[in-house]
Amino acid sequence: MSQIIEPFIHYLNQMRAMMQRDEITEDLLMQRLCPDMFPLHQQISTAAALSLRCCCPLFNKEVSNFKRPTISISDLQQELDDTIDYLEHLRSDPWESMPASITFVAGFANHTLEPEKYFQFYAWPNFLFHFSMAYAILRAAGLPLSKGDFDGFHRYPAGFSFPS
């Protein structure tokens, strides 16, 4: 089951690293790509919550949530830290049987899926959506992030850009 948890931990660590950059300001937390989309702080919180909404049911655990009541850089960093810590401990928990199905709400729709389909078609893609939106907001705000900041694998020399 750790193969389900590992990608969440990896990408939450990438988000944590992006949020620790000097260029991150409190004003940036309210930035949006479009007026009808979540702002940065909510994209980050939603990605963290989706990692828990995915993993907890698969491990027959009550869904945890570490969202803070206030909006600040330090609160978001703590939310990411707590989520990563929870997932790291969950990874080492003795695994019980996986439930036969998982019932969840997506927007205003109720769904029930087999655990594998829940992960593949709902939880993981939605996590990546919110993670990607947070990255896109940071890039649109002018932060010098690269694909390596997103995935943790790519490396480019300083000042590199793709030709137009």
Image (cartoon, grey):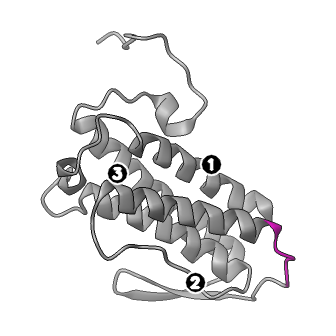
What's the amino acid at mark 3?
Answer: Met
What's the amino acid at mark 1?
Answer: His
| Element under disc 2 | loop
Q: Which residue is mark 2?
A: 63
What's the amino acid at mark 2?
Answer: Val
Quarter of the rendering containing residue 95: bottom right
| Element under disc 1 | helix
Q: Which residue is mark 3?
A: 133
Disc 3: CA contacts within 10 A as few (<14), some (14-19) or many (>=20): many
Disc 1: CA contacts within 10 A as few (<14), some (14-19) or many (>=20): some
Measured along the vertical axis of the image, is residue 23 above or below residue 119? above
- At 68% across and 85% down in the image, what residue appears? 61
- Residue found at the far left of this picture: 35
- At 21% across and 50% down in the image, what residue appears? 33
- At 75% across and 88% down in the image, what residue appears? 99
Earlier residue among tags 2 and 3: 2
Q: Is the C-beta separation of discs 2 and 1 under 8 Å?
A: no
Please count the marks in the image: 3
- At 33% across and 34% down in the image, what residue appears? 22
The part of the chain drawn in magenta is 92-96
| Element under disc 3 | helix
- Image location of residue 67, percent across then percent down: 41, 73
User: Which label sits in the foreground, 3 or 1?
Assistant: 1
| Residue 126 seen in the figure | no
